[in-house]
Image (spheres, coloured by chain):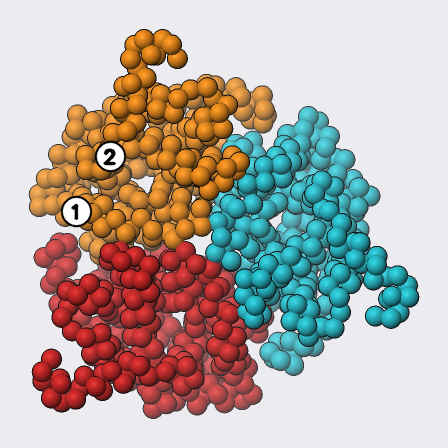
Chain colours: A orange, B red, C cyan
């Protein structure tokens, strides 16, 4: 901590963790989220056939984390929808991405350099959400460490955790897999982040919350930007996870990555949602152009 | 408004909007709802094999709107089940429709002139529910216009919005479609009604609530009676909707109606729930007789 | 009651109904529940591939009844997870059953004499849960008799009522059946128990609650121990039920038992969850050894 103080990092972290998210960061979050929705196979057809279903899916992509966290804490699931400006902003983004003439808006935000910036901004919001979720749960259940982890986790993962039901809304049903059975990188990172923030809240992790927020944001933003730039899905946790899972749970060595290609040869649809969407992205992008 | 006052319509509207729903209108609502349940393919077999599942489905048909609205506002989903008399009444209707000797009760209420009256009475209850839902949400979230629309919408649509899960209870799973992806007339009308009542609650629509209730009830009752009498599923909104969707969302002209017959030729099960049940109605009625 | 008093049964019942459940009985409940999870086809593979999904399923098996009851009463579904010691205990049991070297723990608790004792202890907890659920609902809704039955029912049945969604978490989807459509013995008994405890709470059943708890526990423990020892699924209610259903609901005589083998010959997957797991048990046990 002394080193951080000397570098003035503590103060930077403080300022960073107090920064308002509303217009800029939130818009980036909405854009990247709805971009991922557009990558989903069939979502463009749904947007033509049933705008209400498409809008609802877009809202789940943007506010799924709030909905899940509210449900987990026993509040109204639509509680967040009282913030009319956020909903209107997200709706505008949805409209521009799906219905903008000549697909202009989509082409701009899907342009790689722009997208990388937006992805980095999205991870800033994600980290904040995890921290806020853990803090909120700590407020409701002072010693409910499991609840803190759960709420932080759903705040970070958002729509991914209810992807089966979000897909159902679009008439797609893939029961063979779900985000918990085969976690993507952001979901895993949200889980680890929620555990870290819970340990911090329980005073087991001797670090200031603002420093943790700054550090975790940097890690998430860097990872996601690199992964997006390289179209990669390899997780930075893979090696450690593979060994820990082998020791603790007797999982075969080599990690989840390889399992995907070996084990489910006949059934095969065990790819995670993001992988599928990335796979479909190129086809979509072509079509959309 | 002056014209209305001159015609004493305002007073009529007042009296109408204060009228109690409990025994007569509610019974009509239960009868028509459970009648639609009996039209569903397989529901008679379920009623023989598992009366508990059948009863539960009947309760969802009768009280689905209360359950959904309670869930949306963060209350107990079974909150409405504290009204023992309503539950007992609905249970009696369920028993009579499914198990009455010689199918006598079913034959009476499914007799077209009787059914038309009951359908009209049901729409009176539906309009009231939408208005009450919007009002209730306004009480909880003063400026939560989206929440008002959502709660009014689920209050009007009821079980239709959870039809996938209601079917699952009977062992049926049709993930290719749902009520949001292909809305039936009552669901659409509930959405528009919820928007109207929200605008009224926000003082944007310069009309008294009682007048709006009277007008919307007349529209709904007339539409549904005509549609039931003609076994039709064409929506009175089709033409306007088709143009608005074409302009705003780039949907192909010709409307959803034709899409149903063209697009999903191979998969085909994109018919809305009510269409399916109407299709099955004739077969059922024959069987039942 | 005088006879009971003479036999000092009333006092025994009092003492019995005040007995703490926490370490011993609860552990037995966790062990038997997670044992049933391990019997489920595919659950061992899931435990290797995704420990998080496996742990979550185990938690649903152990605490499903609390989750459902909390949802029904409008509380936070993870409310029970504030009891860290219970969660840690259940997690330890999960770890031992799924990952213990040489499968030692599993072999011990699945050894029939040990299992019979654990099964009996589990039924003690189940009865207590039903009574507590009814009491809790009575506290919230003084005259909500339907709500009392529902909450007592979900407290007794637990994960069985959400088995479709618990399976979905493991990538399995069997929409053709569910626990309400074809109830297993514990689910049925929980329903009848919830009705009895509700009648007692409404002062219609003239018996002390402690006596009812003692009596119902003895009935449940005896029935389940006998059924487990004989690998049987015949319900002691079958004969009475068959006649009552025939008279009231026109169900074909012969009972559900025979229906299972006759009716769904082509589709066939109408076996109840427990039957399936028992069928798979022997294969699993062999594999595991």
- State the residue in front, B250 or C253: B250
* Side of B137 relative to A115 (left or right): right
Q: Is residue C117 visible?
A: yes
* Side of B53 relative to A34 (left or right): right
Subunit of mark 2? A
Q: Is residue C258 visible?
A: no
- Image marks 1 and 2: residues in contact by CB distance under 8 Å: no
Asked if labels 1 and 2 share a chain, the reply is yes
When asked about the image quadrant of residue A40, the answer is top left
Q: Label 1: state its secondary structure.
A: helix
- Reply above or below: B255 against B125: above
Question: Which residue was labeled with disc 2?
Answer: A21
Q: Label 2: state its secondary structure.
A: loop
Looking at marks 1 and 2 on the same chain, the residue that comes earlier in the sequence is marked by 2
* Residue drawn at x 38%, y 32% as measured from the top left: A131
Quadrant position of the N terminus of chain A in the picture: top left
* Side of A163 relative to C247 (left or right): left
* Residue drawn at x 26%, y 39% as measured from the top left: A33
When asked about the image quadrant of residue C208, the answer is bottom right
- State the residue in front, A245 or A16: A16
Pinpoint residue A58: horizontal percent, then vertical percent: 26, 47
Pinpoint residue B136: horizontal percent, then vertical percent: 33, 65
* Residue drawn at x 46%, y 42% as measured from the top left: A140
Quadrant position of the C terminus of chain A in the picture: top left
Which mark, residue C271? none
Question: Which residue was labeled with disc 1?
Answer: A92
Subunit of mark 1? A
* Side of C119 relative to C56 (left or right): right
* Residue drawn at x 54%, y 50% as measured from the top left: C67
Give the CA separation, mark 1 to mark 2: 18 Å
């Amino acid at each position: 901590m002394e080193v951080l103080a000397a570098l003035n990092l503590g103060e930077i972290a403080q300022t960073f963790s107090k920064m308002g998210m509303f217009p800029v960061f939130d818009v980036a979050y909405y854009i990247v989220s709805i971009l991922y929705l557009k990558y989903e196979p069939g979502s463009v057809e749904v947007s033509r056939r049933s705008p209400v279903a498409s809008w609802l899916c877009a809202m789940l992509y943007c506010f799924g984390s709030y909905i899940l966290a509210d449900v987990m804490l026993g509040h109204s699931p639509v509680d967040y929808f009282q913030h009319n400006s956020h909903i209107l902003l997200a709706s505008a983004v949805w409209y521009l991405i799906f219905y903008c003439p000549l697909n202009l808006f989509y082409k701009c935000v899907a342009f790689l350099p722009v997208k990388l910036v937006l992805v980095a901004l999205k991870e800033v919001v994600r980290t904040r959400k995890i921290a806020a979720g853990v803090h909120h749960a700590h407020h409701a259940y002072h010693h409910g460490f499991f609840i803190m982890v759960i709420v932080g986790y759903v705040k970070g993962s958002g729509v991914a955790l209810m992807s089966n039901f979000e897909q159902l809304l679009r008439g797609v049903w893939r029961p063979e897999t779900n985000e918990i059975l085969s976690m993507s990188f952001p979901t895993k990172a949200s889980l680890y982040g929620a555990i870290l923030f819970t340990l911090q809240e329980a005073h087991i992790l001797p670090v200031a919350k603002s420093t943790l927020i700054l550090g975790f944001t940097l890690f998430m933003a860097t990872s996601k930007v690199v992964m997006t730039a390289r179209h990669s899905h390899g997780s930075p946790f893979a090696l450690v996870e593979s060994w820990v899972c082998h020791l603790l749970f007797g999982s075969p060595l080599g990690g989840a990555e390889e399992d995907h290609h070996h084990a489910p040869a006949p059934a095969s649809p065990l790819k995670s949602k993001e992988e599928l969407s990335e796979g479909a992205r190129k086809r979509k992008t072509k079509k959309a152009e």
